[in-house]
Image (tube, rainbow, N blue to C red):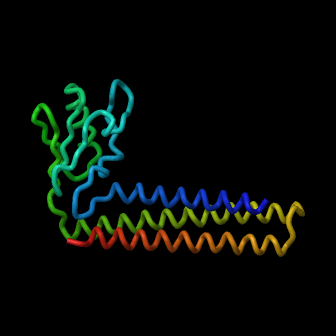
Amino acid sequence: MTQEIFNNTKAHMDKSIDSLKRDFLTLRSGKVSVNILDNIKVDYYGTPTPLNQVGSVIAQDATTIIITPWEKTLLKDIERSIQEANIGVNPNSDGETIKLFFPPMTQEQRKEIAKDAKAMGEKAKIAIRNIRQDSNNQIKKLEKDKNITEDESKKAQDTIQKYTDEYVKKIEDMTKNKEEEVMKV
């Protein structure tokens, strides 16, 4: 019974780590990444559709992203979506493609993005702690229902705490690495 709780705990904690990785991809570091556009949705025949599903999105160099829509009629919708997303650049259209020119980041912008990375890390740690709490509540319920002994309950809660410490450490390392990557000129 406790093994199932352990497996669920680890699976949920892994999902939190994966979510943090996805969040970090949306942050800009020294070199521009197409992942900065991941959260942008375009109105495609009445359906909000991810930008990368209505056209080709490539990073031409360290500061330029080129978007080539599969349908030319989408150019205006894509431009509007990028402007509404407020990612710090204005789209430049030549009638065929949209180019996004990202200026080099200032030290102030780097500090702000590093602060965002830290906040994302804190959010992930809270998620891990909530998972720990849920798992411990399940274990306490097993003990209360007399399905496991008090000793087994204590041992199981210690195991859950070890998982929690391990995952919080992973998050701290990931956050530190992302902050260093952002701050590197």
| Residue pictured at 35% horizontal, 68% vertical | 178
In this picture, residue 168 sits left or right of residue 38: right
Q: Residue furthest left?
A: 94
Q: Nearer the viewer, residue 84 or 105?
A: 105
Where does the image place residue 35, in percent across and percent down from the top left? 31, 51
| Residue pictured at 53% horizontal, 56% vertical | 15
Give the answer, above or below, for where 173 lies relative to 89: below
Q: In which quadrant will I find the C terminus?
A: bottom left
Give the answer, above or below, for where 152 lies relative to 39: below
Q: How many marks?
A: 0
| Residue pictured at 41% horizontal, 55% vertical | 22
Name which quarter of the figure residue 48 lies in.
top left
Where does the image place residue 92, in percent across and percent down from the top left? 13, 41
Name which quarter of the figure residue 23 lies in.
bottom left
In this picture, residue 153 sits left or right of residue 70: right
Q: Nearer the viewer, residue 173 or 117?
A: 173
Q: Residue furthest right?
A: 146
Q: In which quadrant will I find the N terminus?
A: bottom right
Name which quarter of the figure residue 9 lies in.
bottom right
Where does the image place residue 86, in percent across and percent down from the top left? 26, 49
Where does the image place residue 100, in percent across and percent down from the top left? 17, 47
